């Protein structure tokens, strides 16, 4: 058994989760994987080329910044490292340091390239032996267990590679989106005492889970 990181509590369930404004937003392209590659590179789309990469399985824990953790998840997909070295690097002319990750629901975040090249970062299309559902990021998502949930982009459809750091969020949003968000270092937000964010975020958990559950039930009923 792995230990719980600082300030985290074990959750029995793995809820669909995120910032409340994303509860009612869903992916529109579910049947096929399409990820547009952009940034300091001539734009192109990756779809079935992913299947040329070796499939990898990984058991890891998932840590939301609001302090809940779901332990022991079995993911399957493609190592980001393999994607980068096989399909991206040959097309680059600049040295890349910074990566922006964008999703079908409008969510976006960024990570330094070095963090994404760690062996445990996946583009996962399966969870616990089954294709991803809309709850957990269908058709494909980032799994980066060393980073808080908000770096684990669901419904990913665009990846931008840059030779310089970009500022992609403004105001409060940039403050909440720590550039690395490493769980072991408790990088919950850019500034302020860790204990404050542990305390603050706790109040939102139950209501957020309910909002996401309700929106997901409504979405399924319409389908
Ligand atoms: N596209 C997208 N990805 C996202 C989010 C989101 O709202 N939209 N929320 C993030 C947050 S805050 C968390 S904790 C995890 C939750 O993953 P889950 O819904 O599979 O539990 O997704 C992350 N990735
Ligand atoms: Mo989260």
Image (tube, rainbow, N blue to C red):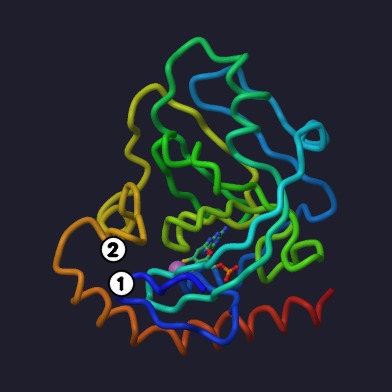
The residue tagged 2 is 186
Characterize the local packing of mark 1: few (<14), some (14-19) or many (20 or more) Cα atoms within 10 angstroms.
Answer: few
6, 30: nearer the viewer: 6
Where's residue 55, x and y in %?
76, 44
62 over 78 or under it: above or below: below
Q: Is residue 100 visible?
A: yes
Q: Is residue 172 visible?
A: no
Precedes in sequence: disc 1 or disc 2: 1
Which residue does the image show at 74% across and 41% down from the upper left?
A: 34
Contact check, label 1 and label 2, Cβ < 8 Å: yes
Q: Decide if residue 140 is on the left or right side of residue 169.
A: right
Secondary structure at numbered mark 1: loop
User: Is the residue indicated by label 2 positioned so its CB lies within 8 Å of ligand 2?
Assistant: no
| Name of the residue lying farthest toward the front | 1
Where's residue 98, x and y in %?
40, 32
Where's residue 215, x and y in %?
64, 80
Quadrant of the image where one finds ligand 1: bottom right
Where's residue 12, x and y in %?
56, 87
The residue tagged 1 is 6
Q: Decide if residue 10 is on the left or right side of residue 123.
A: left
| Name of the residue lying farthest toward the top | 93
Q: Which mark is residue 94?
A: none
What is the quadrant of residue 71 in the picture? Answer: bottom right
Quadrant of the frame with the C terminus: bottom right
- Cα separation between marks 1 and 2: 7 Å
Which residue does the image show at 56% across and 37% down from the upper left?
A: 159
Characterize the local packing of mark 2: few (<14), some (14-19) or many (20 or more) Cα atoms within 10 angstroms.
Answer: some
What is the quadrant of residue 135 in the picture? Answer: bottom right
Secondary structure at numbered mark 2: loop
Observer-side mark, 1 or 2, equals: 1
Which residue does the image show at 64% across and 32% down from the upper left?
A: 82
């Amino acid at each position: 058994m792995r230990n719980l990181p600082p300030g985290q509590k074990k959750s029995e369930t793995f809820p669909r989760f995120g910032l409340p404004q994303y509860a009612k937003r869903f992916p529109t392209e579910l049947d096929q994987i399409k990820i547009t590659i952009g940034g300091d590179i001539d734009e192109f789309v990756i779809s079935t080329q992913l299947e040329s990469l070796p499939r990898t399985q990984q058991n890891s824990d998932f840590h939301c910044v609001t302090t809940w953790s779901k332990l022991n998840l079995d993911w399957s997909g493609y190592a980001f490292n393999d994607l980068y070295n096989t399909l991206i690097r040959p097309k680059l002319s600049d040295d890349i340091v910074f990566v922006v990750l964008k999703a079908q629901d409008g969510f976006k975040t960024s990570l330094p390239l070095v963090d994404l090249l760690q062996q445990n970062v996946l583009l996962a299309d399966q969870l616990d032996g089954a294709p991803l559902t809309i709850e957990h990021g269908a058709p494909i998502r980032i799994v980066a267990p060393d980073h808080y949930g908000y770096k684990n982009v669901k419904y990913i459809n665009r990846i931008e590679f840059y030779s310089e750091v970009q500022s992609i969020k403004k105001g409060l949003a940039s403050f909440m989106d720590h550039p690395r968000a490493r769980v072991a270092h408790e990088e919950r937000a850019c500034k302020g005492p860790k204990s404050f964010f542990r305390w603050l975020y706790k109040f939102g958990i139950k209501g957020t889970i309910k909002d996401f559950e309700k929106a997901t039930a409504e979405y399924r009923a319409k389908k």
